[in-house]
Amino acid sequence: MNEFFAALTQHGFLQSAVVAGLLASIGCGVMGTYVVVKRIAFLAGGIAHSVLGGMGAAVYYGFDPLAGALIAAIISALLIGSVRLQWQAQEDTMIGALWAIGMAVGILFIAKTPGYQTDLMSYLFGNILLVPEKSLWFMAALDALLLIIVGTYHRQFLAVVFDEEFARLRGIPVTFFYLLLLVMVAITVVLLIQVVGLILVLALLTLPAAVAGHYVHSLGRMMLLATLLGSTVSLSGLALSYGPDLPAGPTIILLAGAVYVISALATRAVARRKVRASLPASANRR
């Protein structure tokens, strides 16, 4: 751990990695809260894995992979949201199909692109240590966009997330805000792919928010705590992976998973103790 902090003051790539982790934590803390409360993790997974198609196409035609990822993510979010709203009976099948088709299209484009695309492989599995400066500005701009939209329409999102029928009765355009929410999840996916890759993006999007949900019930506080947890996990994962020379992305996810399991077990144990303490003494003896 000390070795990492000593190296942090000397190496620019480590400083960029820390900034990337902090920027990604803002997106996953804010949007991950909506994903967990709304229970749309499977939809977020479909969006994440279909992004590979856009990245592969962008590289094949000579464009920035992140631009292709952003376009593909937004299109996938709108398609998946429309499927969920129009064909709820076939929702799982349709999302699974879009998930598989997106990855298959991406692999085909990668196969037809001359040369071995190491950049795309890093997007697939994540490499926070190789995030370029221009990508940091791109991530910061996406974070700013997310925060502006959430700050402007927080009450509408709150109504849509907790009770769609009540939101409709209040005259809120539920379809518009639901699709906008999914588009924002898509933007968050693009934020996270350089940190942990498409394969692991769903874990960082949901685990910090799920842990935060164990301790707070206000949506705003949950977002703040999830952001802090995401930042802590990202920095700790970087530090733990540096000495043994382990892949940073999987290390961050394993640490987040361990925090979630420990938190879930602890809150469950506390809940059981409270139940036992509330029972009469005779019932406790039994």
Image (tube, rainbow, N blue to C red):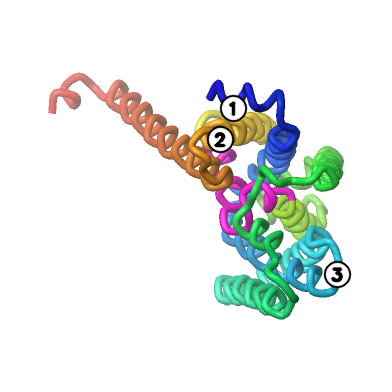
**Identity of the residue drawn at 78% across and 73% down:** 57
Q: Is residue 134 magenta?
A: no
Disc 3 marks a residue whose amino acid type is Gly
Report crowding for label 2: few under 14, some 14 to 19, many 20 or more residues within 10 A (C-alpha).
Answer: some
Residue span colored magenta: 191-212
Label 2's element?
A: helix
Horizontal relation, residue 109 to residue 254: left or right: right
**Identity of the residue drawn at 62% across and 47% down:** 205
Q: Which residue is mark 2?
A: 242
* Mark sitting on residue 4: 1
Q: In 3D space, how far apart are the residues under numbered discs 3 and 1 (Cα atoms)?
A: 36 Å
* Residue 44 on image: x %, y %: 64, 58
Residue lying farthest to the left in this orientation: 286
Quadrant housing residue 242: top right
Q: In 3D space, how far apart are the residues under numbered discs 1 and 2 (Cα atoms)?
A: 6 Å
Horizontal relation, residue 49 to residue 113: left or right: left
Residue 33 in view in this figure: yes
Using the image, determine if residue 243 lies above or below residue 173: above
**Which of disc 2 and disc 1 is earlier in sequence?**
1
Disc 2 marks a residue whose amino acid type is Tyr
Majority secondary structure in the magenta region: helix
Disc 1 marks a residue whose amino acid type is Phe
Label 3's element?
A: loop
Residue 44 in view in this figure: no
Report crowding for label 1: few under 14, some 14 to 19, many 20 or more residues within 10 A (C-alpha).
Answer: some
Whether label 1 touches label 2, CB < 8 Å: yes
Using the image, determine if residue 150 lies above or below residue 197: above
Q: Quadrant of the C terminus?
A: top left
* Mark sitting on residue 62: 3
* Residue 239 on image: x %, y %: 56, 31
Quadrant housing residue 139: top right
